[in-house]
Amino acid sequence: MKWYLLAFKKYTVISGRSHRQEFWMFVLFNILFSFGARLLDALLGTNYSDAKPIDGGYLSTLYSLVLFVPGITITIRRLHDIGKSGWFYFWTSFAAIVAVIAYIVYLVMTLIGNGTGDLESLKAGDIDPSMLLTGNFIMYTVLLVIFILSLGTWIIVLLAKRGDTGDNKYGPDPLATPAE
């Protein structure tokens, strides 16, 4: 629990390093508390309308918003521990977002006007969902899933990697200095 609280103590600190135990204990408690917030949403009836109980609600959304900044900062400090810049996290996230946006544009253009991109077809309701069963669409879907899973796996492997021994350009070894 002390590692979880340490992430809040360093809420906006992106300089320095965070070792593996600090990061993964934060992740573990975050998962447990997130599940608890969803459970509270279900018990208190604060779910969004027409949502399944496990879909979450107002409390779990508030919890996610509170954890957004500490989650990013501890991830950046963890990357610093293995000698990577915090920008590395930004660029991999950006690549995933660009891939999803490109996929959505392809999907919309495929559906509108049977792939012609004719917006008049959209107004007329002449959208043919069978266009989604074409070989190109399936191929692009599989490529997007592989790309996103590869990025995610790569980040997880990096975050699980042993930190640099001794000082690096991001600061002193967190295992050699006592935790704050």
Image (cartoon, helix red, strand yellow):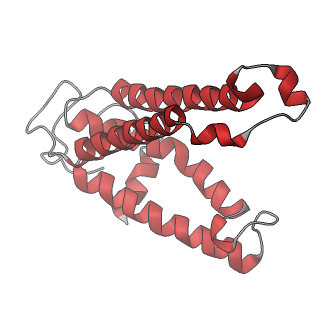
Q: Quadrant of residue 126?
A: top right
Image coords of residue 128 (percent x, y): 74, 38
Quarter of the figure that contains the N terminus: bottom left
Using the image, determine if residue 14 lies above or below residue 57: above
Using the image, determine if residue 29 lies above or below residue 79: below
Image coords of residue 50 (percent x, y): 80, 66
**Image point (43%, 42%), residue name:** 145
Image coords of residue 148 (percent x, y): 41, 39
Using the image, determine if residue 142 lies above or below residue 115: below
Q: Nearer the viewer, residue 140 or 154?
A: 140
**Image point (35%, 37%), residue name:** 151
| Residue 13 seen from this side | yes
Image coords of residue 57 (percent x, y): 71, 63
Q: Quadrant of residue 5?
A: bottom left
**Image point (48%, 33%), residue name:** 140
**Image point (40%, 25%), residue name:** 91
Q: Residue furthest left?
A: 165
Q: Residue furthest bottom?
A: 43
How many discs appear?
0
In the picture provided, is 106 more to the left or to the right than 139? right
| Residue 18 seen from this side | no
